[in-house]
Image: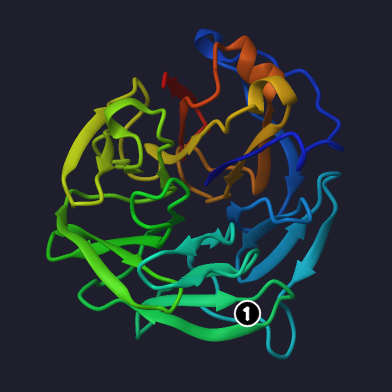
Amino acid sequence: MLWLMAALAAANLALTPAVAGPGGDPAWQSWQTVAGVFDLGGPRSDGTLVVAGSANLYRADPAGTLSPFARGVGGYHEDPGAEAYLAVSPGAHVNAAGCDFNRDDTFLLRLHVPIGIERVDAPGQNTGSFANVIGVTSLNGIAFDTTGGFDHRLLATGPSEGKTMVVAIDCSGNVQVITKSAPALEGGLAVAPSSFGSFGGDLIAPDELSGRIYAIAPDGTVSVVTRPSLPTGGDIGVESVGFVPSGFMTSGGAAYLADRKTPGNPHPGTDAILRLSSTDLSAAGVRDGDLLVATEGGAGARRRAS
């Protein structure tokens, strides 16, 4: 998954210049090794990222130090070895429900029956099932609405009868179906900022098989945003998306990507957290509000202007 940290969260990072990759695109630099890493989220209010690797959770501080998170009695022990993607709460208010998501709580896909969402609180205690999602065979994407078009709810996607179901979950765990007929989707999701043209406020989601990047509006309407010139197909196609936060390019920061190692794949990965600094992104023409897209195999990246 692709995540970007703004200046305050990344102020203590020692950023090194990246070497341009093929076609002038910046090349990801290996930052930290994590066994089985497949997702990361945040930053939390203390500046740390939550990192998922195999069956374990970690926190990574801005200096790159990893510490165990949500371990032991009362910790998180669900779905070992599965890609149970996560999202860290920014602490937003849901108007219709009249409640708030607790800031820094971590929400994870629950991939066993009953399929749904688990919640780990900020100190690292697994509070159990937050919500069940009915009508899907699995779940494959999760993100918070940080713009407000979905009323700042938690969004999740999963396959359903040959299509993709998109649901919005409020701070009390109530689930609303946004659409049952979205095309195939999988991987890192992000809600577009209001500055992102006609797709502002929409859920942006990749399809690694076709290479298309889709926008799902709050009313369930699905549109194609772009089809970047990147490889397509299982385990090599577009897998992660993220938006450059306001002020990121001038104040400084870094983008982070989980690169899971899968032996036998054409692009086996490295079991590392990869990083790109705002300086490297700026040199590639990236601006605040742009959409960044990364592939699962080889960690190629492209931008789409806001």
Rendered location of residue 246, percent (x, y): 58, 30
Looking at the image, residue 145 lies above or below residue 86: above
Q: Which residue is mark 1?
A: 76
Judge from the rendering whether residue 304 lies leftward or rightward of residue 24; answer left or right. Answer: left
Residue at left 61%, top 76%?
Answer: 120
Which amino acid type corresponds to the residue marked 1 in the rendered image? Tyr
Q: Is residue 92 left or right of residue 132?
A: right
| Residue 248 in the image: above or below residue 59 | above
Residue 202: x percent and y percent?
32, 42
**Mark 1 surroundings within 10 Å by alpha-carbon count, few (fewer than 14), some (14 through 19), many (20 or more):** many
Location of residue 58 (image quadrant): bottom right
Residue 203 in picture, x, y percent from top left: 34, 46
Query: Measuring 40% from the left and 34% from the top, which residue is drawn there?
Result: 194
Does 158 sit left or right of 289 as displayed?
left
Which of 183/193 is in front? 193
Q: Looking at the image, which residue is at 34% across and 20% down? A: 229
Dividing the picture into quarters, in which one does residue 27 lie? top right
**In the rendered image, which quarter is residue 69 located in?**
bottom right
What is the basis of the colouring in this image?
A: rainbow
Q: Picture coordinates of residue 96 (x, y %)?
A: 35, 68
Of residues 202 and 18, which is closer to you in this image? 202
Q: Specify whether residue 62 is in view.
A: yes
Residue at image location 43% in from the left, 52% down from the top: 145
Out of 178 and 58, give the one closest to the viewer: 178
205 horizontally vs 84: left or right: left
